[in-house]
Amino acid sequence: MSKNKTRPVPIGKFTVNYTSIEDHTLKDPQFLSLPYSARFVYLILRSKYHGNNADSISLSYKEAESQWGMTRKTLSKALKGLVRAKLIILVRRGGLPLYSSIYSLRGRLWGIQEKTTPPG
């Protein structure tokens, strides 16, 4: 059963979703050197990650334009920058209006654990 997205949410009943991003990613010089649009697209892709779909994330031009007001050119440049920085991996190239590209979040910073020094 799917929820009707146009129905208003009753007062006091809402769902809050969070998108996490690791500190080492936020502090990474290559991530910080990316344009703001590329960083924003990375956050959008991370928000589409649900625990078991790291290798099958997609973002269509139509979705980017309708939800975030992002042009095709901006999205294309942002995705190319993220692939070049190796933060995401292109799994399957899209084509035609029916198929959007599939990306993997398992880039060079995926799964890196920050080294913690023991207290003492």
Image (spheres, rainbow, N blue to C red):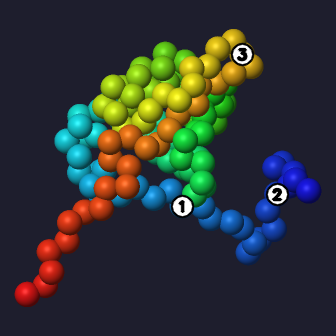
Query: To which residue does mark 2 refer?
Result: 8
Q: Is residue 14 left or right of residue 113?
A: right
Q: Quadrant of the N terminus?
A: bottom right
Question: The disc labelled 1 sits on which kind of residue?
Answer: Tyr
Q: Quadrant of residue 29?
A: top left
Marks 2 and 3 close (CB-CB < 8 Å): no
Residue 69 in view in this figure: no
Precedes in sequence: disc 1 or disc 3? 1
- Image height of 39 relative to 54, above or below: above
- Image height of 91 relative to 26, above or below: above
Q: Say which residue appears at 81% left-offset and 68% top-offset.
A: 10
Query: To which residue does mark 3 refer?
Result: 97
Query: To which residue does mark 1 refer?
Result: 18
Q: Considering the numbered disc 1 on the image, is that residue within a helix, a strand or a loop?
A: loop
Q: Quadrant of residue 14?
A: bottom right
Q: Which mark is residue 26?
A: none
In this view, the residue in front, 74 or 104, is: 104
- Image height of 77 relative to 88, above or below: above
Precedes in sequence: disc 2 or disc 3? 2
**Local crowd size for mark 2, using a 10 Å CA cut-off: few (<14), some (14–19), many (≥20):** few
Q: Say which residue appears at 61% left-offset and 19% top-offset.
A: 94
Question: The disc labelled 2 sits on which kind of residue?
Answer: Pro
Instruction: Please name which of the two marks, 2 or 3, marks the residue nearer to the observer.
Output: 3
Q: Say which residue appears at 84% left-offset and 48% top-offset.
A: 6
**Local crowd size for mark 3, using a 10 Å CA cut-off: few (<14), some (14–19), many (≥20):** few
- Outermost residue, bottom direction? 120
